[in-house]
Image (cartoon, rainbow, N blue to C red):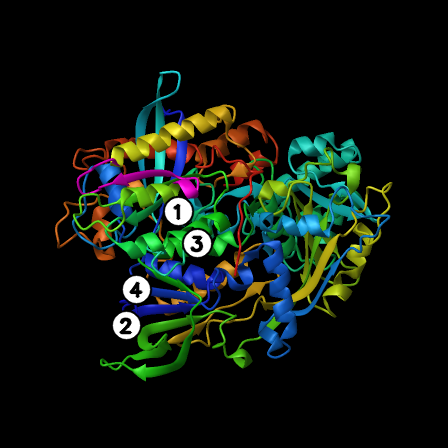
């Protein structure tokens, strides 16, 4: 079959986040990797779709009622019913929006990243950051009694905030400083906080005499917490929030340009650069564990018309090989809306045509969970200019529509009255539930190979738990190998004289080929490159980028 | 600070074996790799060139030239490969009809994933071969029909390789100028590239001085 090798160190089925991280990490340290996906596109549940493909994908999955645990379920899509009186809303209607389908990148699982979080660190430490770009989150909103308000980020924000008194500003600055400086084993705890780890964060804030106003900003917005949040959880969250601000501008969060579907692809690209073989739209069958010639367990499987063997096999959540009984799964309730106005109207939007990326976290009354809203404008290359893409997510309780009902009623409307700009009219809505894994569950320890199973996404804002699980699985599979060490810069690789013996550079030799900032003369023809790369780091690739241009994804 | 005015991303696509990697290596390093094996660990090459603009001045341009990393073998190139490319070089082997027949599939892929405004160049590679299967005229016509520039090259002998990249650079400069001088100093600051180490410090000093950002500094 197309002179594909018959033996691999690792075969990975599915191109979701964890599968792609494992494939990249294994390839990076020299394992031979075959990475396939049954779909003709990358990402599985982690993919971004254009509008038509998104609608079709949900329809197709809606039809299947079997094996619900690892499928999208309870899909309900609706378009606003345009009439002769209201043929369009702000110049948009169904036909016009569908015509723009390819300008959309709609995520099944939308995520934000802390600027100081694990994904950003991993992308930088592995040098995978060169494959993607991010948009800074423009605004973090919070709501009190149904009224939306912008959460202050920087000190400047705090001091210009009108509804925060001067006394409150001082209290807030002092509290924030203490949070950042707090060390659990510090002897001088009295200078910061002397408080038990499992005490409630809200009690600490009250002890510190923070007002309800400030507690609201800190606990429900910056920490995405609730009244039960412990001191330790709250402190970790607020510190992550605060240390993220300033790393890439005045924002704690980043969103990937073109949608989150780009993220697994970045890892796949690295895997390919280090020799991984990619083949989309492929299945394996007849999977068996057999004894190899040297008495090791290997996986033999049918691929196309032939059999291949692999020392290890990794299966994603959407591969039909997953042993679901051994794999506790939950769901995330989701909604996707298209609107012509941003949430909150002019009270929180200085330029109504602007937007960008907006985050709103809203606790659900009587529950420890909240609803996370991520609103995207055309600046993310995920939607047409003039439209807004709204993602709602919350852990599954009773069903997507039920779980999100109160939030939707508070901030959106189904009808259209042109004089009310605070609640956007929903032109398109899709409710559904995506499978997720359970945070805190140990998915790795019971796995002994040679077949390993990946987690799905977690009900978290970012990728931190997914990365933690990926590291755990990888170290179980390859305990002696590094996890995604930095890939060399292009100018660090010196390709030796080309003769038949070393024209194909193998990884064992790569260490010898990598030199750090060597400016000595033996890299002939590359002197310019060496000097250039430094400027390269200072100036991003996308200088001529036109964020308003069409960049389309289409998936079969 | 590095002295160049423009930085452009150029990506290569086309079937396996048409000589994409050889084109890049010939241009960036002046060598023609004899072996067939893929070069592991390399995903783009950089070269700075001087190009004369329409006003007759010489300008430094940096090209970042991306290769497919073998993902073209089974038609599994990541969409993100096409993102933010300024120019796209579609290569076929003029001594191999199937690589020319595959161009329609590649055009479809470009239309789906690449920016519609991207500069497109069709390249018939391996003019050194004496078993040509695709006449020049056929290649030219295909390029014309799909709104692409056209050139035939030989990475083995170096024919037209410099010309290819210099013309791309000149055309991209011209386009940038028409768009209103999008030089590197006019980068859209709302898009964040994580490798921008320099900007981090400037953000911290400008935007968050004495504020939360400072706490961040002291805690690290």
Number of residues whose C-alpha sits closer than 10 Å to that of mark 1, classed few (under 14), some (14–19) or many (20 or more): some
Cα–Cα span, label 4 and label 1:
20 Å
- Coordinates of residue A175 in the picture (x, y in percent): 67, 41
Cα–Cα span, label 4 and label 3:
19 Å
The reply to whether dot 4 and dot 2 touch (C-beta < 8 Å) is no
Viewer-proximal residue among A517 and B180: B180
Cα–Cα span, label 4 and label 2:
11 Å
Cα–Cα span, label 3 and label 2:
24 Å
Residues indicated by labels 4 and 1 sit on the same polypeptide chain? yes
- Coordinates of residue A328 in the picture (x, y in percent): 57, 75
- Coordinates of residue B218 in the picture (x, y in percent): 52, 37
The answer to which of marks 2 and 1 sits earlier in the sequence is: 2
Residues indicated by labels 4 and 3 sit on the same polypeptide chain? no
| Residue B18 shows in this picture | yes
- Residue drawn where x is 50% and y is 36% of the image: A545
Query: Quadrant location of residue A312?
Result: bottom left
Q: Which mark is residue A32?
A: 4
Judging by the rendered image, the residue that carries numbered circle 3 is: B78
Judging by the rendered image, the residue that carries numbered circle 1 is: A127
Q: Secondary structure at mark 4?
A: loop
Q: Which mark is residue A273?
A: none
Q: Which mark is residue A6?
A: 2
The reply to whether dot 4 and dot 3 touch (C-beta < 8 Å) is no
Nearer the observer: mark 4 or 1; the answer is 4
């Amino acid at each position: 079959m197309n002179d594909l090798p018959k033996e691999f160190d690792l075969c990975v089925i599915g191109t979701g986040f964890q599968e792609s991280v494992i494939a990249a990490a294994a390839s990076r340290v020299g394992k031979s990797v075959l990475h396939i996906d049954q779909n003709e596109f990358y990402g599985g549940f982690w993919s971004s779709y254009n509008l038509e493909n998104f609608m079709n994908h949900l329809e197709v999955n809606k039809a299947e009622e079997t094996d619900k645990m690892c499928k999208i379920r309870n899909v309900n899509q609706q378009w606003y019913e345009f009439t002769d009186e209201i043929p369009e809303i702000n110049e948009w209607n169904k036909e016009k929006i569908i015509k723009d389908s390819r300008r959309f990148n709609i995520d099944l699982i939308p995520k934000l990243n802390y600027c100081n979080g694990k994904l950003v660190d991993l992308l930088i430490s592995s040098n995978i950051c060169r494959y993607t770009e991010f948009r800074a989150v423009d605004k973090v909103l919070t709501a009190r009694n149904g009224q939306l308000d912008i959460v202050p980020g920087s000190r400047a924000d705090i001091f210009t905030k009108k509804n925060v008194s001067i006394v409150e500003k001082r209290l807030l600055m002092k509290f924030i400083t203490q949070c950042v400086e707090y060390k659990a084993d510090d002897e001088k705890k009295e200078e910061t906080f002397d408080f038990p780890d499992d005490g409630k964060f809200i009690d600490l804030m009250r002890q510190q005499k923070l007002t309800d106003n400030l507690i609201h900003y800190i606990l429900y917005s910056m920490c995405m917490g609730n009244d039960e949040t412990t001191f330790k959880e709250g402190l970790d969250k607020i510190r992550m929030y605060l240390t993220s601000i300033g790393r890439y501008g005045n924002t704690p969060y980043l969103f990937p340009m073109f949608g989150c579907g780009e993220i697994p692809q970045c890892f796949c690209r690295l895997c390919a650069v280090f020799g991984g073989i990619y083949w989309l739209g492929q299945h394996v069958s007849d999977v068996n564990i057999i004894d190899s010639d040297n008495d090791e367990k290997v996986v033999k499987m049918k691929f196309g018309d032939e059999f291949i063997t692999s020392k290890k096999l990794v299966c994603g959540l959407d591969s039909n090989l997953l042993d679901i009984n051994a794999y506790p799964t939950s769901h995330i309730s989701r909604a996707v809306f298209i609107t012509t106005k941003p949430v909150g109207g002019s009270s929180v939007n200085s330029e109504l045509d602007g937007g960008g990326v907006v985050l709103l976290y809203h606790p659900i009354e009587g529950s420890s969970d909240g609803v996370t809203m991520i609103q995207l404008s055309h600046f993310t290359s995920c939607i047409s200019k003039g439209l807004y893409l709204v993602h709602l997510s919350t852990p599954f309780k009773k069903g997507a529509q039920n779980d999100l009902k109160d939030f939707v009623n508070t901030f959106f409307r189904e009808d259209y009255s042109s004089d009310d700009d605070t609640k956007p009219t929903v032109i398109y809505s899709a409710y559904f539930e995506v499978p997720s894994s359970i945070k805190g569950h140990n998915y790795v320890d019971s796995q002994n190979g040679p077949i390993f199973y990946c987690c799905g996404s977690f009900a978290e804002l970012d990728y931190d738990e997914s990365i933690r699980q990926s590291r755990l699985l990888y170290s179980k599979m390859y305990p002696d190998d590094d996890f995604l060490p930095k890939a060399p810069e292009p100018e660090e690789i010196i390709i030796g004289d080309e003769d038949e013996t070393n024209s194909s550079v193998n990884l064992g030799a790569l260490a010898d080929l990598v030199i750090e900032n060597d400016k000595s003369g033996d890299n002939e023809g590359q002197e310019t490159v060496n000097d250039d790369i430094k400027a390269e780091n200072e100036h991003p690739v996308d200088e001529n980028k036109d964020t308003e241009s069409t960049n389309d994804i289409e998936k079969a | 600070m590095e002295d160049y005015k423009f930085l452009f991303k150029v990506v290569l696509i086309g079937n396996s074996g048409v000589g994409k990697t050889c084109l890049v290596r010939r241009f960036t390093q002046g060598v023609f790799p004899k072996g067939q094996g893929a070069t592991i660990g390399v995903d783009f090459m950089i070269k700075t060139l001087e190009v004369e603009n329409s006003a007759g001045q010489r300008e430094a341009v940096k090209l970042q030239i991306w290769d497919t990393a073998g993902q073209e073998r089974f038609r599994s190139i990541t969409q993100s490969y096409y993102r933010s490319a300024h120019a796209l070089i579609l290569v076929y082997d003029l001594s191999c009809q199937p690589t020319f027949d595959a161009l329609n599939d590649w055009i479809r892929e470009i239309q789906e994933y690449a920016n519609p405004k991207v500069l497109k160049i069709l390249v018939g590679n391996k003019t050194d071969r004496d078993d040509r299967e695709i006449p020049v005229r056929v290649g030219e016509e295909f390029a014309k029909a799909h709104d692409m520039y056209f050139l035939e090259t030989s990475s083995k002998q170096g024919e037209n390789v410099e010309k290819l990249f210099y013309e791309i650079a000149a055309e991209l400069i011209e386009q940038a100028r028409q768009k209103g001088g999008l030089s590197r100093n006019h980068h859209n600051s709302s898009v964040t590239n994580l490798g921008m180490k320099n900007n981090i410090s400037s953000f911290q000093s400008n935007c968050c001085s004495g504020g939360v950002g400072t706490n961040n500094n002291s805690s690290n």
